[in-house]
Image (tube, grey):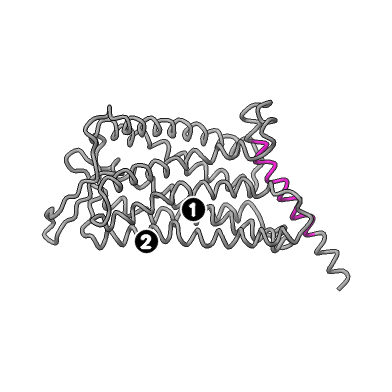
């Protein structure tokens, strides 16, 4: 997605063409390195998320937690499945897959971004409610309600991905953003930053701040394991997507910045954004139990144990909190 931006005037003629970059040879060391990284992201993300889908969808009892994991894995898997098109574009330096795939591949990238962040918001709010209102959560947290929230998140993500389907275009064997004007370009970039990063960041920080304060005053929860995986997922998401949004916003005022800086930043930002798709299954494996113990068992067992552990610990917390609140209520 580092191709040429072209703006049309009211007569629908090309009035300005600004090339972000096209390296002259795939033998350039930095360009080859970027291609290698993209291939690794595809392999790790495709097979890693496929494994998570298989375990959480077919090998584990369906719970609220596995519903979150499964939906995140499906989102990342779809994105990784389309990465070969972008990799081929990078290698050949021309788009040969037609207009539909140009629009579709770009839309899936933003579908992945929005669906992931909306699911992380839901997960954070769910964790916060479970800690602050354990009795209510014990009775109201159901797989059916979790599935409904997942569907809502996906519907919103699809809606916000529509601009990519509309404005992506193919010209001179290049897949690029063909915005009618600079104002529309700015509106889309800013709205994506606000809805896909700023607002979710504020909501998630508030939720986890409440959780930390609550746990500090609650000695029942001696371990922080229930929140390690989700904290790592959230940290990985923002680490991967923040550079992308920063350079996209900088590109709106490209005349104020060095051309090479923007070019490099957009390349690195897009690669980091893609890397988020394989961080999730890696975190599922290495955040559950002691690291040494994980190497003594199979990969499937490691991932399954990590997900089951998080669910069991949360359930124990809810049960203990519920029973304590019930005992307290008998004395009032």
Quarter of the N terminus within the rendering: top left
Q: Which of the pair 4/28 is nearer the observer?
A: 28
Q: Which of the pair 130/213 is nearer the observer?
A: 213
Q: Residue 117's x, y, as percent?
A: 49, 53
66 horizontally vs 14: left or right:
right
| Quarter of the figure with residue 134 | bottom right
Q: Residue 11's x, y, as percent?
A: 11, 59
| Quarter of the figure with residue 324 | bottom right
Q: Residue 54's x, y, as percent?
A: 57, 34
Q: Which residue is mark 2?
A: 191
Whether label 1 touches label 2, CB < 8 Å:
no
Quarter of the C terminus within the rendering: bottom right
Q: Is residue 72 above or below residue 198?
A: above
Residue 117, disc: 1
Give the secondary structure at mark 1: helix
Q: Main secondary structure of the magenta part?
A: helix
Q: Verify whether residue 309 appears in magenta.
A: yes
Query: Magenta segment, which residues?
Result: 304-322
Q: Is residue 178 above or below residue 45?
A: below
């Amino acid at each position: 997605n580092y191709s040429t931006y072209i703006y049309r005037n009211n007569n629908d003629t090309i009035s300005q063409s600004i090339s972000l970059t096209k390296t002259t040879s795939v033998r350039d060391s930095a360009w080859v390195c970027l291609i290698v990284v993209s291939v690794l992201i595809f392999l790790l993300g495709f097979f890693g998320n496929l494994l998570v889908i298989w375990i959480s969808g077919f090998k584990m009892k369906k719970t609220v937690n596995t519903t979150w994991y499964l939906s995140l894995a499906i989102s990342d898997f779809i994105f990784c499945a389309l990465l070969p098109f972008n990799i081929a574009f990078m290698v050949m330096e021309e788009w040969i897959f037609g207009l539909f795939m140009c629009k579709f591949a770009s839309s899936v990238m933003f579908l992945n971004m929005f669906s992931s962040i909306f699911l992380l918001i839901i997960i954070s709010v769910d964790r916060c409610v479970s800690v602050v209102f354990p009795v209510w959560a014990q009775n109201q947290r159901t797989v059916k309600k979790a599935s409904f929230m997942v569907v809502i998140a996906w519907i919103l993500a699809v809606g916000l991905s529509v601009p990519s389907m509309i404005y992506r275009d193919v010209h001179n064997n290049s897949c690029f953003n063909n915005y009618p004007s600079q104002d529309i370009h700015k509106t889309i970039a800013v709205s994506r930053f606000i809805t896909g990063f700023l607002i979710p960041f504020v909501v998630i920080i508030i939720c986890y701040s409440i959780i930390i304060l609550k746990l500090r005053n609650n000695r029942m929860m001696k371990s922080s394991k229930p929140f390690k995986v989700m904290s790592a997922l959230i940290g990985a998401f923002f680490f991967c997507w923040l550079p992308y949004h920063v350079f996209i916003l900088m590109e709106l005022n490209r005349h104020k910045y060095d051309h090479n800086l923007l070019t490099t930043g957009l390349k690195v930002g897009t690669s980091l954004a893609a890397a988020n798709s394989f961080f999730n299954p890696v975190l599922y494996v290495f955040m559950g139990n002691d690291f040494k113990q994980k190497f003594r068992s199979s990969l499937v067992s490691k991932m399954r144990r990590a997900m089951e552990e998080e669910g069991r610990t949360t359930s124990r917390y809810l049960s203990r909190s519920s029973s304590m609140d019930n005992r307290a209520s008998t004395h009032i």
